Image (cartoon, grey):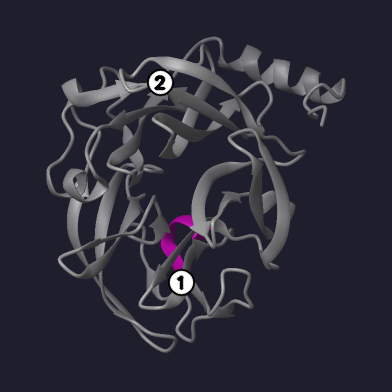
């Protein structure tokens, strides 16, 4: 069995969607990728009246995620799409950061061994690496400036599902660092609310974090954490909400692991656990492509 994800967007703010769960008839879904392919981890923004969504694009024949973009006009018509960032290693979770008039992307690339920040040099399809923020393979790094301090929430790979059951924090005075690990790392444990799952937002004066519930399956749902204490020495949070994929898209009720948003638009993804008799042939294709060097991108 394999996970197949799909991405949609809603014309409401993330704060509103977090309070009033989305309904199927208000979600615009991106084009399906075809057999044994999916898109996931959406983040996006509006520029000059155009909505641009960045997402992980994955093909089981290649087994290496790339960051692709999709652009929509005001009538929700798809007007452009293409590759945004491709590397020799797997990419996902294209987290967007705006600072000092620049647009940055902080994609998950733990197989590279480090966490690298990219700056946009031509929107939306040209990005250059500018800084290694952490010399560790951080997963789903989520960065926010809150009360004058930069904070980063992330997971780390390891045995027994460590990436889904331990939350780490780092902090800095400047986006470019240096970043200091939190004194209480890992600040949270357990499969319910330890892996980041989207954009932080402020509601009723408190910072909230979308977190993945990985108890029954990877990315089963989004649990919302309200941050009660956040200092370099202490962290405390309370689970205050939950979003699931139930009823959002036919055939995709097995998971919901990204809730992101800005500019009055919210982005989500939902999962189908897929079983097919063709799966062994897809695995064989991957092995043949790898042996022939066909899974390495031409950069």
Task: Say left or right for 62 vs 194.
Answer: right
Where residue 265 sits, quadrant-wise, is top left
Outermost residue on the bottom side: it is 233
The image's mark for residue 13 is: none
> How far across and how far down the image is residue 43, in percent?
44, 41
Q: Nearer the viewer, residue 127 or 272?
A: 127
Outermost residue on the front side: it is 48
Looking at the rendered structure, the number of numbered marks drawn on it comes to 2
Q: Nearer the viewer, residue 253 or 24?
A: 24
Q: Can the viewer see residue 144?
A: yes
Q: Which residue is pictured at 23% across the width and 39% down the height?
A: 244
Where residue 208 sits, quadrant-wise, is bottom left
Which callout, 1 or 2, points at the residue further toward the start of the chain? 2
> How far across and how far down the image is residue 206, in percent?
22, 70
Residue 211: in magenta span = no
> How far across and how far down the image is residue 114, in percent?
70, 60
Quarter of the picture holding the C terminus? top right
Q: Which residue is pictured at 24% across the width and 44% down the height?
A: 13
Q: Nearer the viewer, residue 110 or 285?
A: 110
Q: Can the viewer see residue 1?
A: no
Image: magenta residue range: 160-168
Q: Which residue is mark 2?
A: 30
Q: Which residue is mark 1?
A: 151
Q: Which residue is pictured at 36% across the width and 58% down the height?
A: 191
């Amino acid at each position: 069995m394999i996970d197949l994800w799909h991405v949609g967007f809603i014309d409401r703010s993330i704060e509103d969607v977090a309070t009033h769960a989305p309904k199927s008839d208000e979600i615009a879904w991106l084009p399906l990728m075809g057999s044994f392919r999916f898109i996931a981890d959406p983040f996006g923004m509006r520029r000059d009246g155009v909505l641009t969504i960045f997402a992980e694009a994955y093909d089981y024949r290649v087994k290496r995620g790339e960051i692709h973009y999709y652009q929509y006009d005001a009538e929700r018509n798809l007007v452009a799409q293409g590759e945004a960032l491709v590397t020799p290693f797997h990419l996902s979770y294209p987290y967007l950061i705006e600072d000092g008039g620049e647009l940055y992307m902080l994609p998950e690339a733990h197989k590279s061994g480090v966490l690298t920040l990219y700056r946009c040099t031509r929107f939306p399809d040209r990005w250059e690496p500018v800084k290694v923020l952490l010399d560790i393979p951080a997963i789903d790094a989520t960065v926010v400036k809150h009360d004058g301090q930069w904070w980063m929430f992330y997971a780390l790979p390891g045995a027994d599902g460590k990436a889904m059951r331990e939350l780490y924090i780092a902090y800095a005075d400047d986006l470019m660092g240096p970043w200091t690990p939190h004194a209480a790392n890992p600040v949270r444990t357990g499969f319910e609310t330890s892996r980041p799952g989207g954009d932080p937002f402020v509601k009723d004066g408190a910072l909230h974090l979308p977190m993945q519930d990985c108890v029954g399956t990877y990315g089963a749902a989004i649990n919302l954490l309200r941050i009660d204490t956040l200092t370099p020495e202490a962290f405390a949070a309370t689970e205050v909400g939950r979003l699931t994929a139930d009823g959002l898209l036919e055939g995709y009720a097995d998971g919901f692991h990204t809730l992101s948003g800005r500019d009055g638009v919210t982005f989500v993804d939902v999962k189908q656990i897929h079983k097919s008799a063709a799966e062994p042939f897809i695995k064989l294709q991957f092995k043949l492509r790898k042996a022939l060097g066909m899974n390495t991108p031409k950069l």
